[in-house]
Image: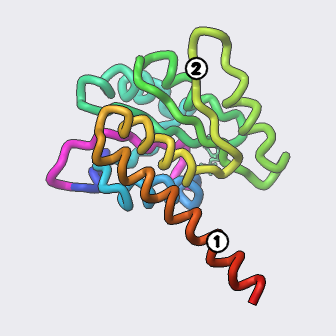
Amino acid sequence: MTRPLHSSETPVVGVVMGSDSDWRVMNAASEVLTEFGIPHEVEVVSAHRTPDKLVRYGREARGRGLRAIIAGAGGAAHLPGMLASVTALPVIGVPVQLATLDGMDSLLSIVQMPAGIPVATVSINGAKNAGLLAARILGSADAALADSVEAYARDLEAQVEEKNRRLKD
Ligand code: RP5
């Protein structure tokens, strides 16, 4: 069952993951989207265990009003790439680190897409940046959101300078 996180508004970002065990990582994407006030939904969609659902989710995503998909998976992480093959929406892939291989298997499974079907891959466990990238994508057509993204960057800058000042005290 798809879970809208801002009940009154239609989700514009889908946060999907291959297993509920990925939530410990993917939660960070959802938190960022919430911080920016971006209505989103969370769903477990497995490329291998629920392939029909994957195709349905990808094919229906645009029609349901989604404008970007963040997809996280670990190991043989085919979810982001397969979603990108059945939707024209931008797909942001999050390689989830599992206990073996340090997440390199997840990273390489997601990043090495064939020409023609792009996935914007963030770092291993980089769900926070995936949320921020989705905010930037949506911000390209939403000035208020783009202003919020700029304010976020300015805040980061201020934090670094504050730490720098404290270092010198
Ligand atoms: C992948 O297999 C999932 O994305 C998850 O990272 C991994 C392990 O899944 P579980 O066995 O914990 O359900 O498809």
Residue 25 in sight from this viewpoint: yes
Specify the amino acid type for callout 1. Glu
- 27 lies left or right of 140: right
Task: Single out the residue that lies furthest toward the top.
Answer: 116
Name the residue carrying label 1: 161
- Element type where label 2 sits in the image: loop
**Residue 1 sits above or below residue 31 on the image:** above
Residues drawn in magenta: 7-21
Q: At which x and y percent is residue 112?
A: 72, 23
Pointers 2 and 1 in contact (C-beta within 8 Å): no
- 3 lies left or right of 20: left
Answer with mark 2 or mark 1, whichever residue precedes in sequence. 2
**Residue 57 part of the magenta-drawn span:** no
**Residue 121 sits above or below residue 44 on the image:** above
Specify the amino acid type for callout 2. Pro
Name the residue carrying label 2: 118
